[in-house]
Image: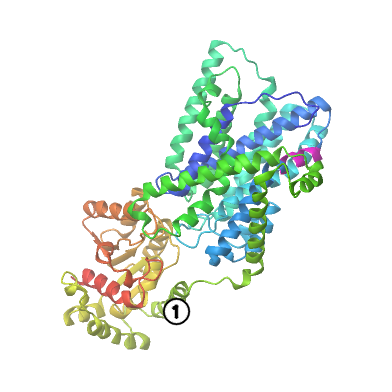
Amino acid sequence: MNRNLKKRRYINGFDGIRTLAVIGVILFHLMPYSIQGGYLGVPIFFVLSGYLITDLLNQEMQQNGRIDIISFYKRRIKRLYPGLVTMVLVTVSYITLFQRELLTNIRQVMVTNFIYVYNWFQVVHRESYFDRFGPQSPFTHLWSLSIEGQFYLFWPLLLILLWTLVRRKQPVFDIIFIAAFISALLMALLYKEGQDPSRVYYGTDTRMFSILLGASLSIVWPSTSLKKELTNMAKHTLNIVGIVSLILIIWMFFTMPGESSLTYHGGMFFFSLLAMIFIATVAHPGADMNRLMTNRYFSWLGKRSYGIYLYQYPVMIFYEAHVTNIAAHPWLHALIEIIIIVVISHLSYTYIERPLQHFDYAHFRDFVLEFFKQKSRYGWKRLWATGAVAVIFLTLIGAVQQPSATASKSDQQLQDALQANKEKVAKNNKKDIQTGEKSQALKQDKKTVATVQEKGKQTDSNTAAQTDGLSEAMAKKAQTLRVTAVGDSVLADGSVKLQSIFPQMYIDAKVGRQMQDAIAVLQSLANSGKLANIILLSIGTNGPFTDDQLDSVMSVVGKRKVYWINTHVPTRRWQGQVNDSLTAAAKKYPNLKVIDWYTYSQNHPDWFYDDNVHPNEYGLKYYSTYIAKDILK
């Protein structure tokens, strides 16, 4: 802090707000479809950061008549850089040793994070924040730090300009608030219904409104000018407003999904306003909200919230990469991950963030000389230097070897199969399914039906009847049956096998497809009159869905017969949630039948690629025949 400033009032309740925000974010990343609005913890951080930084700069301007921008930059770097740099280097080192497939673009990832433009790297490379199934980057969450870094760089300059040209509080507040509104408007305008919203989620232009709302609050609600004594009416009003806003914030944590159009058409802006109001009530010394958000647990977690935020994704991704059946005990694994995150964050706070934040870099040379003396007073701490050198060395190896990072053999086989299937299915879909005209390719593919029948083998007495292949009557019926199939990568994997059984099956399958995308596809097919009377769905691999979304699907398909393949995705927590939702829906809708692929495929790891989700060439004969038999019964 600038030495010319009188000591600022430390607001303990802000640690409680940081705790609330980081808990929301962590739970969202661990259970994205149970705490579906937990990502809103980030706007809370943004609003709080905008308020605190602007409040500090305004106080400096008022007391000194100027803002020492260089000093401000130094303070921010010393506060944020040690933790960020350490996390990035340690993570890249781990990747280099154990998960080399994640080395793709690692040099660009490192550089863009260090110069705080990583969010735009994600936009340019079309990285999805909401794809829960595909390969996950341990750096995905750092987009928000880049936005804050950009704010720290430009905001002092813009604030000086505002105070120089405008001078009065009300117009300054108006300008900042209008700028926030324009940012929210950009979010609404750039959001495209039915498309992945990651562009507007990552963009500085579309997310800056949260920070600006916090900044605007500091203009009219400066922490050092708020009165400690209030009338009972004013105090009670602040307390009620604070409690109501807190309740609404927690409620929205559970009810505002990150892929809802409402979120981007004003929902996130409204939430940021709530956060601004809540922060205002906690900041006021005359209200009770500060005491409500203050306790030793909140204080402890709040001070470590930066480290918790930094290390959450690496811990989750690295841990879950080594757990083959996380769906069996999702809450237990979540608890273990939380403990690991908190422990690492505490170590980071104690041994890296705090010491380096207060380290006097003017004496860096003296520190280095003393550190490497034979009888240095730092003693055992020199072991940290050895570890740091090892981490840097491994990071350099990973950065140099970036181009050699490739997918595993099994992953590559799956990718090749999906690409080949995509081309074949696209060709098959072009045929006129209404007239039943058959392409030469599909005539040749009929041989596959016989192949499935001949190669079907008994695995045990319980599954023998289901793996022998189709009866002659079933195979004949399948040749003329019109089916519309919509699904994700698992359906894409089995698409060619299914079309060889059902030559008149139209398939629309896409890697990473979520429920909202499937609804849009079904609605488009219904509008164009291309929905057959039999619908096959394979949705749920990439995440669960709400009851309202499932109702929307059934509303689109109407009275048509729907067959829905449940999920075998043991590497994700939502496997049970998806399958339970489908079981309940089958009781509600008489025209919905669940194809229980999950139970049928249990204890058959040899049917799947290494991801234990997509059937391999051997498993596809069981997959396609089992589905066909359910449809043809």
Residue 571 % position (x, y): 39, 59
Magenta span includes 281: no
Q: Give the left or right position of residue 588, taking residue 344 as reference.
A: left
State the count of labels: 1
Magenta span: 69-77
Q: Residue at x 17, y 82 (%)?
A: 472
Of residues 342 and 374, the one nearer the viewer is 374
Q: Residue at x 22, y 74 (%)?
A: 459
Residue 352 % position (x, y): 65, 43
Image quadrant assignment for residue 353: top right
Q: Residue at x 38, y 62 (%)?
A: 522
Magenta span includes 72: yes
* Amino acid under disc 1: Ala
Instruction: Establish if 569 lies above or below 34.
Output: below
Of residues 96 and 13, the one nearer the viewer is 96
Q: Give the left or right position of residue 75, taking residue 625 as reference.
A: right
> How would you classify the magenta stretch by its main secondary structure?
helix
Q: Residue furthest front?
A: 375
Instruction: Establish if 343 lies above or below 542.
Output: above
Residue 141 % position (x, y): 56, 51
Helix, strand or loop at mark 1: helix
Q: Is residue 407 visible?
A: yes
Of residues 316 and 272, the one nearer the viewer is 316
Residue 354 % position (x, y): 66, 38
Query: What residue is shown with label 1?
Result: 420
Q: Residue at x 47, y 27 (%)?
A: 244
